[in-house]
Amino acid sequence: MKRFAAITGVCLSLLSFPVAADDTDMLPGICLTQQIASIHVPFNEANSDIAVLRPAVNAEIAQIQSLSNTIGVTRMKAAGVNYSIQPPPEGSNTYQLTGQVNFDGVPFAKAPELLRLLIAKGFPATLSFVEYNQGPGLCRFNASTGQWE
Amino acid sequence: MTALCLLLLGLSQVQAAHTVADIANVSIPFGGEVEQPEQAHALIGHKIKTLAAPATAVGAGTIHLQSVAYTLTPVSGGYRVEGNVFIDIVPAVRTDDFVAVLGKKGIQANVSYYNRCIPLASR
């Protein structure tokens, strides 16, 4: 444990170097080392038989997970689904289901590749990231020196 | 530590709320388009860069980069990036001036003040 703390301390001190104002493009990569990626895929199903709408969504989710497996993303999970069903408009017998499924557990490094794959396969996916600064002493802008440290 | 916090909270009764808070959390929205998802970091870095001059101009103390949250949506020829950069300003006292300078540059910012001292009743 002590060795881990020492190594972490050395790593943090190595990272704590001034960053010139022109090099701020580097800051997200240096500081925001805890990264969470999620994929969101909207869906839209229509059928005269309301009973087949929800299974159709499940089939899409399974297809997306199967696609993700092909690029080595194996721990992605459908974290939540929200949807609404519109009754048939007058003169029609077609029910419409619209909604979105959210996937968690997407590896940060693989997320762009997965997004490209899903779009190429016809899923209008959106990717969202949250990236945190894990070292509270890192990436501070000192207004008196005019430098990121 | 608790005694110190209670003392500071007591003193806070006679001061304006924004001068008591020792940290200001500021979120700055950003947006743009990139050809590839991997280029989003450059866009964020550019946004962060725009904060340096106003912070220096008003002597804003220290800015701590806390986090970013953003979404990539496919558009024709690339991806639309929308999100927020979250920073803490310590001490918070120059934050209003900092946000005013950002506003003059056309940069929107949302501010919340908070105090590191936590009253016992809320623990």
Image: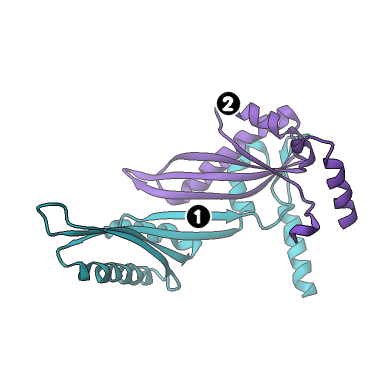
Question: Among the chains, which one is purple?
Answer: B
For chain A, the rendered hue is cyan
Residue A143 location, x and y as percent? Answer: 74, 35
Is residue A119 toward the left or the right of residue B118 in the image?
left
Q: Quadrant of residue B46?
A: top right
Residue A42 location, x and y as percent? Answer: 33, 57
Q: Which residue, given by chain and number where applicable, does mark 2 sit on?
A: B105
Q: Residues within 10 Å of mark 2 (few under 14, many from 20)?
A: few
Is residue A98 toward the left or the right of residue B1 in the image?
left
Q: Are marks 2 and 1 on the same chain?
A: no
Q: Which amino acid type is marked by label 1?
A: Phe
Q: Quarter holding the C terminus of chain B?
A: bottom right
Q: Which residue, given by chain and number where applicable, does mark 1 sit on?
A: A129
Question: Alpha-carbon distance for marks 2 and 1?
Answer: 27 Å
In front of the other: A98 or A109: A98
Residue B59 location, x and y as percent? Answer: 76, 31
| Residue in the picture at 21% in, 71% down | A51
Q: Chain of mark 2?
A: B
| Residue in the picture at 23% in, 67% down | A53
Q: Chain of mark 1?
A: A
Find numbered disc 1 in the image and state the secondary structure of the residue it sits on: strand
Find numbered disc 2 in the image and state the secondary structure of the residue it sits on: loop
Name the disc covering residue B81, or none.
none
